[in-house]
Amino acid sequence: FTPEQRTGLQTILQQVLLRGDQLRSHSHLEQSHAEIQRLEAAQREQEAFYQALVESLPQAIFRKDLDGRFTFANNRFCSTMGKSREDLIGRTDEAIAPPELAVKYREDDRRVIASRQPIEITEKNVGADGRTRWVHVVKSPIFDAHGNPVGIQGIFWDVTAERETAERLERAEANYRGIVENARDGIFQTTPGGHYLSANKALARIYGFRTP
């Protein structure tokens, strides 16, 4: 995902979940019976649409209240954690994550609520199989109709493969630098026009310089 795609996805998610809340809390006390039935039918239809949309996303999605208790979890989040929705709702991170990760998750949640701003981080996650993976997480605050924070919502996806590839490239680059810098022969790179792009210490010594 590009930053723009992640921002767009988070915006869509926020609109979907907030719209679901609005629909569930909507009431018209002075409407006619027929109008109330029509509104209820429309509400059920839109709730089904938004629920299907959230469940169709390949990312894990969750919401928590100010006390860190889960109030929503989509199917992908449940399967990732190896828990049913009934086992998750009302529970905290301490019930599903190792202690050190649960503490970190809670600190991140408090930071989001205190700053009233979203955060985007890559962090460790332990799945249902006990394996530690790297996930990219976007967390943002949830506000009530008066602008008061009432919790946080998050979305994350597995980036373990990308993380491992980057680490392999870093190790390979470090090994290459070690070989070049410790070589007794002069090693260098130049442009087609003969301008030096890089040189090792041995080449610098050959030409009488202290450093490349």
Image (cartoon, rainbow, N blue to C red):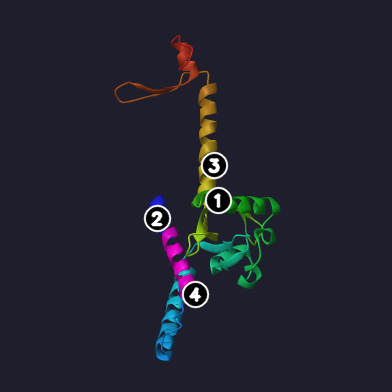
Residue 78 pos. (x, y %): 59, 67
Q: Disc 4 vs disc 3: Cβ atoms closer than 8 Å?
A: no
Residue 130 pos. (x, y %): 67, 58
Residue 67 pos. (x, y %): 63, 60
Q: Disc 1 vs disc 2: Cβ atoms closer than 8 Å?
A: no
Q: Residue furthest front?
A: 30
**Disc 3 from disc 1: Cα separation:** 33 Å
Q: Say which element carries label 4.
A: helix
The number of discs equals 4
Q: Residue furthest bottom?
A: 34
Task: Say which quarter of the image contains residue 113.
Answer: bottom right
Q: Residue at x 51, y 60 (%)?
A: 142
Q: Who comes first in sequence, dot 4 or dot 3?
A: 4
Q: Which residues are magenta?
A: 10-23
**Tag 1 residue:** 114
**Disc 2 from disc 3: Cα separation:** 24 Å
**Disc 1 from disc 4: Cα separation:** 26 Å
Residue 46 drawn above or below residue 83: below
Q: Disc 1 vs disc 4: Cβ atoms closer than 8 Å?
A: no
User: Which numbered mark, 2 or 3, is in the foreground of this view?
Assistant: 2
Q: Amino acid at mark 1?
A: Ala
Q: Residue at x 65, y 52 (%)?
A: 101
Magenta part mainly helix, strand or loop? helix
Task: Say which quarter of the image contains residue 93.
Answer: bottom right
Q: Say which element carries label 3.
A: helix
**Tag 4 residue:** 25
Q: Say which element carries label 1.
A: helix
Q: Residue at x 55, y 51 (%)?
A: 114
**Tag 2 residue:** 5
**Residue 160 visible (yes or no):** no
Residue 44 covered by magenta stretch: no
